[in-house]
Image (spheres, grey):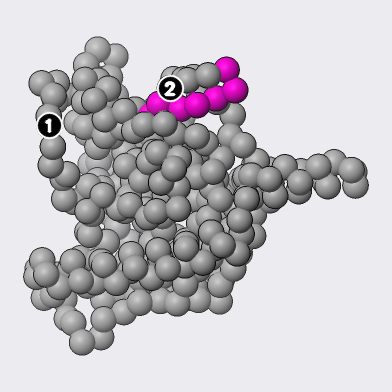
């Protein structure tokens, strides 16, 4: 979801989008005022082959799909990886389609800034994405939809490479509050290997503040390492073909807690910690079971080329 609790720390003077970013900020305000009913199942069907072709580069493996309810509302919570490439997100989305089909409504909370981009925002709406800072998730769950949420957002997706096996939601617990308030189960989904595909050196929070990106719910401007040296999100390096494993975990519910628990900060924090601990335990296990994902990814690509 969006940053429901702001991290403390030093703040730069710039708090509003600067220069060419101002029109994007105005467009984003308009996007927030829209509902979440632009999803088009037939359009999604036409995009599936393209998305599978993209994710095939990462030789994905999906586990535990039986833990995902085949129907009804569910809040799927994942760890976010690989900056703006996010291959594990696409692998997860395809798994949801494989399990539930396209007719059953499913939405993904997505970076707000992307909705302000011409064509990109339209594409995202049509495949079921909704702005992370909007209030559409609760409405979708109330209507029986599935909602895929990455609470760590850009903070986690752009964490330094050496923290790739650490789940970091940045102190955000709004997903637990949402689950408590709506009474829907949380289905954790953990991705391993995806963050190995892009070498992030630093989040670039200072640059983001200088550009005024926090005003559009974006708190990072990642510094990356590519084949030609250090670069940024403006000229990103191509992702490495790291082999990705996505694993759904058993659902988590709190039947002893009613909707009023959503207003208890301690209860929300305990529930959020329970989800994060289950996910970190699974990621620690996958780190051992699926070691060296980049080497395995290159080997898988080589094998496919030989057998063509």
Identified at 76% across, 48% down, the residue is 300
**In terms of sequence position, does the residue under pointer 2 or pointer 1 come before the other?**
1
Report crowding for label 2: few under 14, some 14 to 19, many 20 or more residues within 10 A (C-alpha): some
Tell which of 13 and 218 is nearer to you: 13
Q: Residue at x 12, y 32 (%)?
A: 10
Percent position of residue 286, x then y:
54, 63
Residue 90 located left or right of residue 177: right
Q: Which residues are magenta?
A: 222-228
Q: Residue furthest bottom?
A: 256
Residue at image coords 20%, 71%: 270
Identify the residue at the far right of this view: 307
Residue 253 position by quadrant: bottom left
Q: Are marks 2 and 1 in contact (CB under 8 Å)?
A: no
Q: Position of residue 304 (x, y in %)?
A: 82, 46
Left or right: where does residue 84 sit relative to residue 197? left
According to the picture, the residue beneath numbered tag 2 turns out to be: 232
Under circle 2, the secondary element is: strand
Query: Closer to the camera: disc 2 or disc 1?
Result: 1
Q: Is residue 199 above or below residue 290?
A: above
Relative to residue 9, is residue 132 depicted above or below? Answer: below
Q: Is residue 142 magenta?
A: no
- In front of the other: 81 or 129: 81
User: At 60% across and 64% down in the image, what residue appears?
Assistant: 289
The reply to whether residue 104 is in sight is: no
Residue linked to disc 1: 10
Q: CA distance from mark 2 to mark 1?
A: 22 Å
Estimate the x, y position of residue 149 in percent, counting from the top left: 36, 56
Q: In the displayed structure, would residue 14 be above or below residue 215?
A: above
The C terminus, quarter of image: top right
Indicate the secondary structure of the residue bearing disc 1. loop
Query: Which residue lies most toward the top here?
Result: 19
């Amino acid at each position: 979801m969006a940053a429901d609790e702001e991290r403390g720390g030093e703040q730069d003077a710039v708090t509003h989008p600067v220069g060419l970013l101002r029109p994007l900020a105005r467009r984003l305000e308009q996007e927030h005022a829209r509902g979440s009913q632009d999803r088009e199942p037939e359009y999604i069907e036409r995009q599936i082959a393209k998305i599978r072709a993209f994710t095939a580069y990462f030789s994905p493996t999906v586990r535990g799909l039986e833990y995902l309810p085949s129907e009804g509302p569910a809040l799927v919570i994942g760890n976010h990886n690989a900056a703006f490439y996010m291959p594990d997100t696409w692998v997860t989305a395809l798994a949801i389609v494989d399990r539930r089909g396209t007719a059953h409504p499913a939405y993904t909370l997505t970076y707000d800034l992307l909705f302000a981009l011409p064509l990109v925002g339209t594409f995202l709406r049509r495949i079921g994405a909704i702005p992370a800072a909007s209030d559409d998730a609760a409405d979708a769950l109330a209507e029986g939809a599935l909602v895929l949420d990455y609470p760590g957002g850009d903070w986690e997706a752009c964490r330094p490479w050496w923290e790739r096996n650490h789940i970091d939601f940045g102190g955000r617990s709004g997903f637990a509050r949402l689950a408590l308030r709506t009474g829907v189960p949380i289905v954790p989904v953990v991705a391993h290997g995806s963050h190995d595909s892009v070498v992030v050196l630093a989040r670039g929070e200072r640059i983001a503040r200088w550009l005024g990106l926090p005003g559009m719910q974006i708190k990072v401007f990642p510094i990356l390492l590519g084949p030609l040296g250090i670069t940024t999100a403006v000229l990103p390096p191509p992702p490495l073909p790291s082999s990705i494993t996505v694993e759904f975990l058993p659902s988590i519910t709190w039947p002893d807690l009613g909707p009023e628990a959503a207003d208890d900060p301690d209860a929300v924090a305990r529930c959020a910690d329970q989800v994060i601990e289950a996910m970190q335990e699974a990621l620690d296990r996958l780190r051992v079971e699926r070691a060296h994902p980049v080497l395995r990814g290159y080997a898988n690509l080589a094998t496919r080329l030989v057998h063509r």
